[in-house]
């Protein structure tokens, strides 16, 4: 890579196989531009955490290459770790350290020059609005305060690239909005590149310039949120028959204006150009066919529909981590910490 790739991320045929047979990530290709907020979405176990682990030098790829901030991750893992910041999905703050001690520890781990440590720590405590709690133990912090502390931990060394793995999981809407306010401020002030996985699709829709959807270890779709929505080709009409109703997919397919019909969880999703004009036709067709209806609804395309379209599954915010993801996370934490001691 050339100097022009500083601040960028690139995966080339990147793959990870466990035990010779479990293909967690299968030859993915993507590029994140310098200064971009890039979203990486996928169902539980789709390969998100494994991919982030390979990009951050916490996992060794089985094949393919990863480049971060102008460096080949496999060849220069320690240099990569010094240039990136990472905020993990699960809390990593030490309950028995104060906020100030946590950031002083981070500065030492990242080899921040000793003369700079005090200034940076004080600046981040104030910027993240935890200055008043700087000398309290982290275990007394609220969820939002801990997330802000962990964000400060990840940027104490002024990285060019920040990896956020489910950074707002478990926060209430106010805490999530506050966290993102700080992240976007960092990006604006420092031109930081941000790679984020999230369980909240509205976050990805509002914050990310481009998105990749990974499913079963492969990239199912990528583009800007608007581009991905446009690929659905119009509105989505959801038809939910009463329990025990006769199959309706074939009948619905033949209604004028319907371009495609899929079935999931007892409901039918109809693609069409104009949902409002289609609904009366759908209801009339169901009445003629003797199919009772619980509900009919119209939705403009959203990332929820995009996700369902390309993965065949709804995006469930309450999914827990898979066993593979949990093992990857633990390995990444140990690697990130151990590599800088």
Image (tube, rainbow, N blue to C red):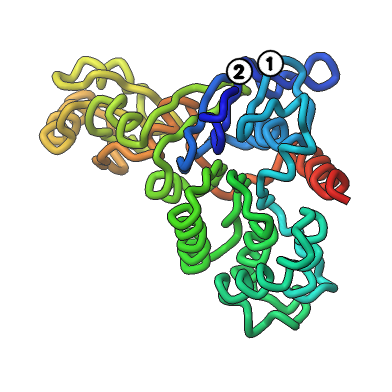
Whether residue 265 is visible: no
Q: Position of residue 334 (x, y in %)?
A: 85, 46
Q: CA distance from mark 1 to mark 2?
A: 6 Å
Q: Residue at x 29, y 37 (%)?
A: 301
Mark 2 element type: strand
| Residue at position x 13%, y 29% in the image | 281
The residue under label 1 is 64
User: Is residue 95 among what the camera can see?
Assistant: yes
Q: Which of the 4 image quadrants contains residue 19? A: top right
Instruction: Tell which of 335 and 21 is nearer to you.
Output: 335
- Give the x, y percent position of residue 272: 21, 26
Ranked by sequence position, the earlier of labels 1 and 2 is: 2
Residue at coordinates 58% horizontally, 76% vertically from top-left? 126
Query: Where, by quadrant of the figure, is residue 302 drawn?
Result: top left
Asked if the residue at tag 2 contacts the one at tag 1, i.e. Cβ–Cβ closer than 8 Å, the answer is yes
Q: Residues within 10 Å of mark 2 (few under 14, many from 20)?
A: some
Which of the numbered marks, if any, corresponds to residue 226?
none
Which quadrant is the N terminus positioned in? top right
Q: Is residue 30 left or right of residue 259?
A: right
- In the rendering, which numbered label is found on residue 12? 2
The residue under the point 83% across, 14% down is: 20
Q: Is residue 199 depicted above or below 1 in this figure?
A: below
């Amino acid at each position: 890579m050339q100097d022009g790739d500083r601040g960028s991320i690139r995966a080339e045929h990147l793959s990870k196989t466990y035990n010779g047979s479990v293909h967690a990530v299968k030859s993915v290709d993507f590029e994140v531009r310098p200064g971009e907020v890039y979203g990486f979405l996928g169902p539980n176990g789709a390969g998100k955490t494994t991919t982030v682990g390979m990009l951050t030098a916490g996992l060794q790829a089985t094949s393919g290459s990863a480049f971060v901030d102008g460096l080949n991750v496999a060849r220069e893992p320690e240099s990569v770790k010094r240039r990136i910041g990472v905020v993990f999905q699960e809390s990593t703050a030490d309950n028995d350290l104060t906020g100030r001690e946590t950031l002083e520890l981070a500065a030492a781990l990242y080899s921040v020059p000793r003369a700079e440590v005090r200034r940076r720590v004080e600046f981040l405590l104030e910027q993240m609005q935890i200055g008043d709690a700087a000398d309290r133990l982290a275990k007394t912090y609220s969820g939002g305060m801990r997330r802000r502390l962990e964000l400060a931990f990840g940027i104490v060394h002024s990285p060019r690239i920040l990896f956020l793995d489910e950074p707002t999981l478990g926060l209430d809407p106010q805490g999530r909005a506050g966290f993102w306010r700080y992240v976007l401020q960092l990006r604006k002030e420092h031109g930081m590149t941000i790679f984020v996985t999230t369980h909240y699709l509205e976050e990805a829709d509002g914050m990310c310039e481009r998105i990749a959807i990974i499913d079963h270890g492969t990239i199912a779709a990528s583009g800007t949120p608007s581009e991905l929505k446009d690929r659905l080709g119009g509105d989505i009409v959801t038809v939910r028959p009463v329990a025990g109703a006769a199959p309706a997919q074939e009948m619905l397919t033949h209604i004028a204006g319907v371009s495609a019909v899929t079935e999931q969880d007892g409901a039918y999703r109809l693609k069409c150009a104009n949902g409002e004009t289609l609904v009366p036709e759908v209801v009339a067709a169901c009445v003629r066919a003797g199919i009772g209806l619980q509900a009919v609804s119209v939705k403009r395309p959203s990332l929820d529909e995009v996700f369902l379209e390309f993965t065949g599954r709804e995006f469930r915010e309450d999914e827990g981590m898979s066993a593979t993801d949990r093992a990857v996370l633990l390995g990444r934490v140990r690697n990130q910490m151990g590599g800088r001691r």
